[in-house]
């Protein structure tokens, strides 16, 4: 099984490998193992800008063998300011099904005297805290917590523990991860990894992580980083996620991505086998009778899993990586991503649709292909179906899909690892620029009755894709009146010149939601003394507000590209119907189109057929923008955002 060091409080993935292991529902108490090298507390580092809590020692040691791993962690910090007194607690979290924790010590060093706070567990509180309960996730993890009493400015807090992980299900494979992550300067930072020569370890460091020293004594290999006055580098602002790993060190005993794939595949093969008398067979027969088209069948299967089983993660015991059997998930009508994936796989295979499970990283996919192979890299699993040579990525944890298989957009996870008994490597999930706006706003103002009369206004908002599905679901859950009230309040809070009277919703079979609001608007026609005419400036235009690429301080990867939200597509328009069919009126605003910062932009300001129109759209066509283009992009964006949209009335009106 993969291991993620508790030293950084990294939560075990929602698909943690299950299996029998040494288990402990209470921590043990005692000294570190003999292989641990216990350090002396160093003096405070010289730091003119030290934070309120200064790191004196950050010591991380680990031992890996064919059965698993043991991690030792010691943190020694000094309270420099009263602002740090609120952090007077220490805790460690573990999975009792496969991990055991030993607490070595918790003490305050004050005026040269050591005050023991651990007291062999007298004040240790054991909690089971389901942090993600509101997200229907239960993992059974335990937390040992100790409140530090009488903490004072000037105190040194010394906290150390070890935790052991054993999981035979994956043959003792392990993964270790370190990150330099603290404020200011640490007096001493040490990373020490030990492994047996029979258990090959592959390691990789980020560009700002210190170069390790390698040595060998007999069959034991050692990787060592030992730095005084250590300071973590800051990732480049605005860069894609992969550049945030510059302070990282990772190590693994997995041989490669194929090893991860082969290890996990049998779990899904076994769980997707239906019983001969499975109640699912009736559902499958109904889908088969409805259509012979594999695309229709696949989508009906997805809808069945989405609509008739709810999401609930049960990560206790063997509920980690090991999926529940398809029949069990169907019987209880709930499942997590593993259970829903297995259920969908079983249905698709019975329907003759080629399909396989695929591991993905929901939030950390960027640069996954540059990392070392490990099951710890993933926290979600979906289905990849193949129909007529095309891949369709199906996620049974979604809800509300109605528009058919071809309407499903590839998910934003970037990389997927198919699970196959023969092994597989990472495959890129290719996303294309959107062909229609996901958000479209249209405002039409009828001011034909005169400049000083209330104008009739109609605001139309169109939501496509996941935004439309989310609103459609909200309309099914909440009372319509409540949703209408929220819409009215949203408009009035930012547009006090508009009074919304009616709100209407239209939901298409494809899940596109159109919201139409009508009411009255008070247009502020002001006299421009410079030109001697009255003007109406579209509220919010010409503010100069823009989301630009931030300037960077010198440091590692300071010339990294800038990230762009992709795929994204939005469009907006403002139309004003003018008095006297627009005779004598004029408009002023930007007219520009082209590519800027990875986006296709278009802005049009025109007066035609008695209507003043201001339209704009932004469509991302790239994920990244080269560093050297950023300044010119910001300059152009500032100019465009500073141009107001203005309608000028003829003199005398």
Image: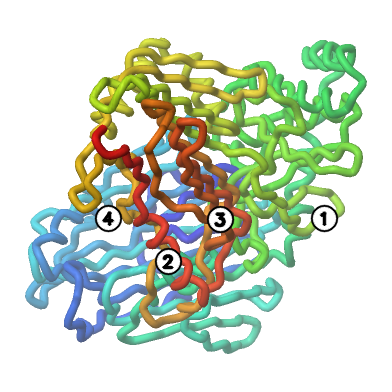
Is 465 placed left or right of 209 in the picture? right
Point out residue 444 in the picture as x, y percentages from the top left corner: 43, 27
For the residues labelled 2 and 3, the Cα–Cα distance comes to 16 Å
Secondary structure under the numbered disc 2 in the rendered image: helix
Dot label at residue 90: 4
> Which mark is nearer the camera, 4 or 1?
1
* Nearer to the camera, 168 or 315: 315
> Which mark is nearer the camera, 2 or 1?
2
For the residues labelled 4 and 2, the Cα–Cα distance comes to 45 Å
Identify residue for label 1.
Answer: 423
Point out residue 509 in the picture as x, y percentages from the top left corner: 66, 18
N-terminal-most mark, 4 or 2: 4
* Nearer to the camera, 504 or 327: 504
N-terminal-most mark, 1 or 3: 1
Q: How is the image coloured?
A: rainbow
Q: Is residue 2 above or below residue 607?
A: below
Dot label at residue 635: none
Q: Residues within 10 Å of mark 4 (few under 14, many from 20)?
A: some
N-terminal-most mark, 2 or 3: 3
Taking the spot 20% from the left edge, 64% from the top edge, the residue there is 107
Identify residue for label 2.
Answer: 634
Point out residue 324 in the picture as x, y percentages from the top left corner: 67, 31
N-terminal-most mark, 4 or 3: 4
Point out residue 416 in the picture as x, y percentages from the top left corner: 70, 51
Q: Is residue 593 visible?
A: yes
Identify residue for label 3.
Answer: 593
């Amino acid at each position: 099984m993969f291991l993620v060091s508790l030293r950084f409080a990294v939560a075990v993935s929602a698909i943690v490998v299950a299996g029998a292991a040494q288990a402990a529902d209470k921590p043990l108490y005692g000294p570190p193992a003999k292989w641990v090298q216990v350090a002396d507390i160093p003096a405070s580092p010289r730091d003119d800008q030290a934070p309120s809590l200064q790191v004196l020692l950050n010591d991380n040691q680990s031992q890996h063998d064919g059965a698993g791993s043991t991690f030792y962690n010691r943190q020694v910090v000094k309270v420099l300011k009263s602002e740090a007194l609120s952090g007077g607690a220490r805790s460690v979290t573990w999975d009792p099904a496969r991990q055991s924790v030993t607490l070595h010590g918790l003490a305050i060093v004050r005026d040269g005297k050591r005050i023991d706070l651990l007291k062999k567990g007298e004040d240790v509180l054991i909690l089971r805290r389901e942090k993600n309960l509101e997200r229907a996730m239960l993992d059974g993890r335990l937390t040992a917590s100790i409140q530090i009493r009488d903490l004072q400015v000037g105190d040194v807090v010394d906290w150390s523990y070890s935790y052991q992980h054993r999981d035979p299900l994956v043959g003792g494979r392990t993964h270790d991860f370190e990150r330099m992550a603290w404020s200011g300067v640490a007096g001493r930072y040490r990373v020490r990894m030990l492994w047996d020569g029979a258990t090959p370890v592959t390691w990789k460091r980020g560009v700002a992580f210190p170069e390790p020293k390698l040595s060998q004594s007999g069959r034991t290999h050692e990787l060592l980083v030992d730095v005084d006055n250590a300071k973590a580098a800051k990732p480049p602002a605005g860069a894609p996620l992969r550049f945030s790993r510059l302070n990282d060190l990772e190590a693994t005993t997995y041989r490669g991505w194929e090893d991860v794939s082969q290890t996990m595949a049998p779990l899904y093969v076994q769980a997707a086998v239906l019983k001969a008398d499975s109640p699912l067979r009736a559902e499958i027969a109904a889908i088969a009778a409805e259509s012979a088209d594999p695309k229709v069948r696949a989508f009906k299967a997805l809808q069945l899993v989405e609509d008739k089983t709810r999401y609930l993660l049960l990560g206790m015991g063997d509920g980690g990586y090991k999926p529940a059997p398809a029949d069990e998930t169907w019987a209880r009508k709930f499942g997590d991503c593993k259970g829903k994936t297995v259920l969908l796989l079983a249905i698709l295979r019975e329907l003759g649709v080629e399909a396989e499970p695929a591991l993905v990283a929901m939030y950390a996919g960027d640069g996954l292909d540059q990392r070392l192979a490990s099951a710890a890299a993933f926290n979600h699993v979906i289905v990849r179906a193949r129909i007529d040579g095309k891949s369709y990525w199906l996620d049974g944890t979604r809800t509300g899909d109605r528009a058919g298989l071809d309407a499903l957009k590839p998910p934003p996870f970037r990389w997927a690892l198919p699970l196959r008994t023969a092994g597989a490597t990472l495959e890129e999930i290719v996303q294309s620029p959107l062909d229609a706006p996901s958000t479209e706003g249209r405002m039409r103002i009828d001011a034909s009755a005169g400049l000083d009369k209330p104008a009739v206004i109609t605001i139309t908002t169109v939501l496509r894709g996941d935004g439309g599905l989310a609103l459609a679901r909200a309309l099914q859950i909440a009372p319509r009146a409540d949703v209408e009230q929220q819409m009215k309040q949203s408009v009035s809070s930012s547009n006090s010149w508009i009074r919304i009277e009616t709100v209407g919703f239209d939901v298409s079979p494809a899940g596109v939601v159109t919201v139409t609001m009508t009411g009255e608007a008070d247009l502020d026609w002001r006299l421009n003394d410079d030109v001697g005419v009255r003007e109406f400036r579209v509220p919010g235009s010409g503010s100069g507000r823009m989301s630009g690429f931030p300037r960077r301080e010198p440091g590692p990867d300071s010339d990294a590209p800038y990230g762009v939200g992709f795929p994204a597509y939005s469009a907006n328009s403002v139309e004003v119907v003018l008095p006297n069919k627009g005779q004598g009126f004029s408009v002023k605003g930007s007219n520009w189109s082209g590519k800027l910062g990875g986006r296709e932009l278009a802005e049009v300001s025109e007066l035609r057929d008695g209507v003043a129109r201001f339209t704009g759209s932004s469509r991302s066509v790239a994920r990244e923008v080269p560093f050297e283009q950023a300044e010119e992009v910001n300059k152009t964006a500032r100019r465009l955002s500073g141009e107001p949209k203005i309608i000028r009335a003829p003199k005398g009106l």
